Image: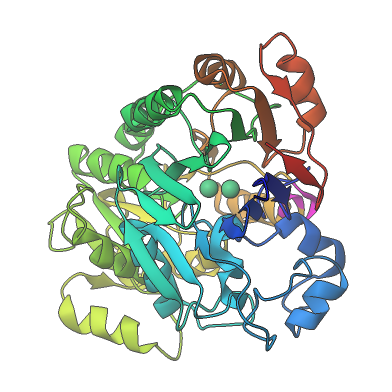
Amino acid sequence: MVKHETTLTFYGGVDEIGGNKILLKDGDTKVFFDFGMSFAMKKLFYSPPFLSPKSAKSLQEFGILPKLDGVYKFDNEEPQVDAVFVSHSHLDHSAYLSFIKREIPVYCGETTRTILQAQSEIRRADLEFNIEGLNFKTFRTGKKIRIDNLEVEPVHVDHSVPGAYGFVIHTTQGSLTYTGDFRHHGAKSEMTDDFVEKAQEADVTAIITEATNMTGASISSEQEVEGKLDAIVGQADGIVLAEFAYADVDRFNSFFRVAKKNNRCLAISLKQACLLESLRADKGLSLPSIDDESILLFRKSKATSYKWEKQLVDKYPDKVKGAFELSKQQCGVVLAMSFYDLEELVEIQPKPGSCYVLSASEPFNEEMEIDFERLVNWLDHYGLPQYHVHVSGHIMPLQLKTVLEKINAKTVFPVHTENPRLFGRFMRNLKSKVILTEKEKEYKI
Ligand SMILES: [Zn+2]
Ligand SMILES: [Zn+2]
């Protein structure tokens, strides 16, 4: 009898934040964990919208999309992969599902599928984000999914988007675990505790862990964020402009509660409203209805509307406000907006006493720095002070060390980090052996 070999190969997420594509082979069984877009690799060659990849061939030319047989919809081979498991909906974990053969099953949480579907309604399908025809199979925490030699157990974790999972995977050579993206300081830290407990029980031999925050770590929590937002909104006597990730439901809830408490409305974009409508059906998430008296829908001034936008406007005619209307009720509004909505300020004309709250990560690359300079120019022009109130979606180094000590796997593979060497040195007194992964190299477990 041929002895089974179980191996891991990392096709992305190595020396970079995101782009995770991890292949687990167990004998003849092959399963990918995540199939994300590598923003770091892409920006080495492309500068959208004017220099954008035109085809999968272009992406493969530069190694942005790995060269694999029997995986992509554009090759004519039989599928050579049994399944793809997606940890959560962030594009650095999910976007390149676009290229996956439609007969290969894609397992993800129900919430993840909802978010991906809402996103595909909101933005037009393009080369790098097209989920049409994917063979989704959804799970909830605790379900066990058998894929030939493997049994995969998704366990919820806390992250900056709902529906995030880690996986405990039982192979013919013992068990291993993959954290996906996770943290221990969010609104639902007990979910991360559940994950750690499951991994401990399974006595895993290997752990693949995210290690995003090895520099610039900070101690805070979503609760603290809410408290700070309350202090800001409570003192402001003009409009409060707020930038935060539109799929970050915890942050949305923090802003919503703070707006309500301070007798303001939270005005959200139609895009965010569309996502909330879809997520409202999810019983696991406690989200207010768009009908709530403290919610308004902000419609940007533009010539044309998409179908989904028209539907929302028809459904909530009294809720929809444009920049001109908001400019008349500045003290009663917290306006969720993004960098790309700044043009609306020309109509709003923020009053003295207004302010801008950046509730997302600070710029971490050159392009973001340039945009940030532009943002500062806008704020300067309108006399808007800027507050930074944020907490990361990723676990902090000392907490991660505690988690790794508890799980106590034989080997640790850091992914989703620009600092694997620092991680290795920081973790050098663990009983586990840290392996600094190389891209496309096969590791036996
Ligand atoms: Zn990520
Ligand atoms: Zn993420």
Q: Is residue 330 above or below residue 179?
A: below
Residue toward you, 426 or 1: 1
Q: Going by the picture, which residue comes out furthest to the front?
A: 1
Q: Is 227 contained in the magenta span? A: no
Q: Is residue 291 above or below residue 432?
A: below
Q: Where is residue 307 in the image (x, y as percent from the top left)?
A: 34, 89
Q: Is 366 contained in the magenta span? A: yes
Q: Main secondary structure of the magenta part?
A: helix
Residue toward you, 82 or 179: 82
Looking at the image, which residue is at 54% across and 34% down? 174
**What colouring method underlies this structural image?**
rainbow
Q: Is residue 281 above or below residue 128?
A: above
Question: Which of the 4 quarters of the picture holds residue 221?
Answer: top left
Side of 48 relative to 248 (left or right): right
Question: Which of the 4 quarters of the picture holds residue 72?
Answer: bottom right
Q: Where is residue 213 in the image (x, y as percent from the top left)?
A: 64, 30
Looking at the image, which residue is at 49% across and 56% down? 86
Q: In the rendered structure, which segment of residues is drawn in magenta?
A: 365-369
Looking at the image, which residue is at 65% across and 50% down? 1
Is residue 41 shown to the viewer in this render? yes
Q: Is residue 382 above or below residue 49?
A: above
Q: Where is residue 162 in the image (x, y as percent from the top left)?
A: 36, 49
Looking at the image, which residue is at 64% across and 47% down? 4
Residue toward you, 81 or 113: 81
Q: Where is residue 361 in the image (x, y as percent from the top left)?
A: 58, 42
Quadrant (top left, top right, bottom left, bottom right) of the C terminus: top right
Is residue 160 shown to the viewer in this render? no
Side of 383 relative to 314 (left or right): right
Q: How many marks?
A: 0
